[in-house]
Image (tube, helix red, strand yellow):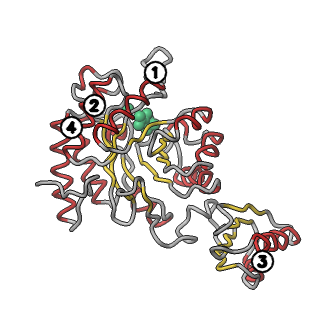
Amino acid sequence: MLVIHMERGCKSLEVARVCGFLERKGCSLRVVGSFESPYIVSDGDEEVGNLILSLQGVKAVTPTKKPFPLASRETFPDDNVFNITEEIKIGGGNRLIMAGPCSVESRSQIIETAKGVKCSGANVLRGGAFKPRTNPYSFQGLGSEGIALMVEAKKETGLPIVTEIMSPEDLEWLEPHVDILQIGSRNMMNFSLLKAVGRTRKPVLLKRGMMATVDEWLQAAEYILAGGNHKVILCERGIRSFDKSTRNTLDLSVVPLIKTLSHLPIIVDPSHGTGRKELIKPMSMAAIAAGADGLMIEVHPRPHEALSDGAQSLTLEEFQDLMDSVNKLCNALNEEVKTPCGLRIAM
Ligand code: PEP
Ligand code: MN
């Protein structure tokens, strides 16, 4: 595969010339991104790449054998750092702590949780409104009403929000309201959904499929990048294994592995990854120590009343305790968790 990096501000005629050249050589091609600074992905070989280098408007050509050329670190050696809001970034040492309930259940529940997690130093509020439940009779989420409550919680606290999108049809109305679109584990290979979020310019949190290999996961990310959206955050949330003593097997080795393979930021969700409250703090610490760019933690003011995933949800007090430890660790690593208002978390 080749990734052809065009000059910023190059002319559309120059892009067309490269495309014409590739076509004459019988190579596939796909133009990605805006015409000010596009990339062209092609199945041409190194010899074709060398010839293309001499064409006008071409800045660089990266050959790669990886099936995820745009997600690969070979193509983009620097960490992909991008903004979630004007103040909050992820990647390159900027960590995101996303916390909140599994499901949005009521106004009071989401506002109380949002205020609590913000106070403890979370910088993104999570909450599911469209829930991908295994059983059709389980609580399916509040749908658009849940999104309206998330928006209220955002107004109340200033925390940006992340929520799962299950269907491409919801994208148009949902996109303006949310700060990060979550693709759940069960939808990691829903290619219509991946293509749809690839067309937006909103950050996308792409959870690892529960049976997905790293190659499959990065190719799912490639769908979004190939659509022109470079703001992809990977999220390790555990994979299925033979051992039922935890809900899933949290694969923390994937954090440093992804760092070598890809420039994309990666966060860890130890809540779904272990399904066990007592394991969430130690696994959060391990994830940060392994180099994760953040965490996603399920928090509920009264976990025993939760309509989904209560057994793995931390109370607000337990989340504060987790953040105290995470901050001590970040300080030991000579860094800090950046809060929305830029405050350093009190120790
Ligand atoms: C979630 O985060 O709400 C969720 C359903 O997680 P996953 O897709 O990882 O199961
Ligand atoms: Mn959950």
Dot 3, crowdedness within 10 Å: few (<14), some or many (≥20)? some
Foreground of the two, 33 or 132: 33
Q: Nearer the viewer, residue 65 or 5?
A: 5
Name which quarter of the figure residue 270 lies in. Answer: top left
Q: Which residue is mark 2?
A: 111
Q: Amino acid at mark 2?
A: Ile
Dot 1 corresponds to which residue? 140
Q: Residue 257: percent from the left, percent from the top?
A: 44, 61
For residue 287, the mark is none
Above or below: residue 223 compared with residue 108: below
Indicate which label's residue lies in the foreground, 1 or 2.
2
Where residue 62 sits, quadrant-wise, is bottom right
Residue 116 marker: 4
Q: Closer to us: mark 4 or mark 2?
A: 2
Label 1 vs label 4: CA separation?
A: 25 Å
Task: Read off the residue under disc 3.
Answer: 48
SS at mark 4 in the image: helix
- Left of 210 or right of it: where is 21? right
Question: Which residue shows up at 44% across the image and 37% down it?
Answer: 163
